[in-house]
Amino acid sequence: MLFKALSAAVYGIDANIIDVEVDFSGIKTLEDRFHTVGLPDAAVRESRDRVRAAIKNSGFDIPPTTIVINLAPADIKKEGSGFDLPMAIGILGAYGALQLQDLSQFLLIGELGLDGTLRPVPGMLPVAVAARERGIRHLVIPKANAREAAVVDGVSVYPVETLNQARELLNAAGNGGIHTPAFRIEAEQVLSEQQYHGPDFADVRGQQAAKRALEVAAAGGHNILMIGPPGSGKTMLAKRLPSILAPLSFDEALETTKIHSVAGVLDAEAGLVTHRPFRSPHHTISDAGLIGGGVIPRPGEVSLAHNGVLFLDELPEFPRNVLEVMRQPLEDRNVVIARASMSLSFPAAFMLAAAMNPCPCGYFNDRSRECHCTPPIIQRYVAKVSGPLLDRIDIHIEVPAVQYRELRSGAASESSATIRERVLKARRIQAERFQKEATHGKFRTYSNAQMSTPQIRRYCELSPDAERLLERAMQQQGLTARAHDRILKVARTIADLAGEVSVSLPHIAEAIQYRTLDRSYWN
């Protein structure tokens, strides 16, 4: 007898619907013959043992026979343990243990334990989105994945804990209707109720220039590099950057959640990423860990930081090849990973925040400590960060050691909430500016840092004085065309923070100040 069920496989951050076709011969054999076809990986092939044990321990005595399971389309590689539940339901249906014969409106996914319990699987949000787009009305999934799937409108989510519960649910549907209410959460309400409770800029003494640079970076989505001696507060400042970022929109939250779901790092209790990510990988990370990889590629840190911040502390300590692979994502806002069997794309619209010492000992140009590094040693250290990568960082800011009087001062420092109000005001100006803009590539423009070349020309017109200042800076500092565009983008953000329509001389002057570290700092 032939029985069909529906499941899904995740590729990149999207899911494909998979037909699970079960052929049950019904002829007793001396030993079980269980064949899975349709390009299954090792985890899928091993499912035959899990499924057999789960069915037996759920109270069904199916005699040894020949079972053939086809996962269609057969030309797409299938991986993971999520096919356990549809396989088991397909076998029970073919055996005659299900009253509902048409499962075209049910998508089933989940890993089975040997006792018939269901375990969660990664990538449930893309699965729910794919089900909605295919017109499949019901999802039968593990209970631990329920909150994640329930944020998608248009599908009914039924969380189950065991194979028997899934069978009873489907039998109820075959007997005239499901009486168990579907699980549902209001994602937009969850987002609106979230408040930030992390570190605050009020804790930081001194470093007014660095705080200003971070405010500009947050307001325009600009990449920033902080250079200073050990203990000057670079890491402390970076960890407070999320406290002044604009809140996630609903669309951004869904896209970010899809990436975290696929990577298997989503908090099951939350079900939705409600704050902008802050990722801080160690400098021993590999290029595959940073960008993503695998036989069937999985997202790396640059994608997990999508719509948030990627913080790289001790930047020159990262291997050169690891840093260089970031150049394309910084420009294109996505990562393309090609394999022999497929090519997948992951979003990577992140804000890069980096910190580094000016030399190996950390005290070059420091007023309170003597540097013992020779010029060749300093040059080798600095050369670990390539010029093309520095070009892609909009703001370079020096973070000197904090003086004792500033450290012990009782004066209140400006809070994150106050800074955030200015950032949000600038972001609203940018949202209105780019609302009716056509996209470049496949991405919309949300911030000044993402402006295309035509948009820079349109929104960054300079006064004659500002034009002359920029020309002089380009010639004296030997800046590249890319640095020129980034100065204009930063100047546009500074003008937005000031609430001014045009980009004038003070805005360009401050933006140029954030590029002086390109050439002069180590000379």
Image (spheres, grey):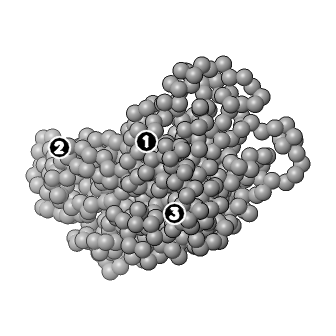
Give residue 259's position: percent from left, percent from top: 42, 55
Of labels 2 and 1, the one closer to you: 1
Q: Residue at x 68, y 41 (%)?
A: 399
Could you tell me how far apart the alpha carbons at marks 2 and 1 are, in whole angstroms?
A: 61 Å
Instruction: Assess whether mark 3 and mark 1 are in contact (beta carbons under 8 angstroms).
Output: no
Instruction: Assess whether mark 1 and mark 2 are in contact (beta carbons under 8 angstroms).
Output: no
Q: Is residue 25 visible?
A: yes
Regarding mark 2 in the picture, which secondary structure is present there? Answer: loop
To which residue does mark 2 refer?
A: 32
**Along the line of sight, which residue is nearer the eye, 153 or 5?**
153
Give residue 224's position: percent from left, percent from top: 57, 48
Give residue 354's position: percent from left, percent from top: 56, 42
Q: Outermost residue toward the right?
A: 410
- The disc labelled 1 sits on which kind of residue? Pro
Q: Is residue 508 left or right of residue 124?
A: right
- The disc labelled 2 sits on which kind of residue? Asp
Could you tell me how far apart the alpha carbons at marks 3 and 2 are, in whole angstroms?
A: 63 Å
Q: Residue at x 40, y 33 (%)?
A: 321
- The disc labelled 3 sits on which kind of residue? Asn
To which residue does mark 1 refer?
A: 388
To which residue does mark 3 refer?
A: 448
Q: Residue at x 52, y 54 (%)?
A: 471
Q: Residue at x 11, y 55 (%)?
A: 25
Count the numbered circles shown.
Answer: 3
- Does label 3 or label 2 sit earlier along the sequence? 2
- Does label 1 or label 3 sit earlier along the sequence? 1
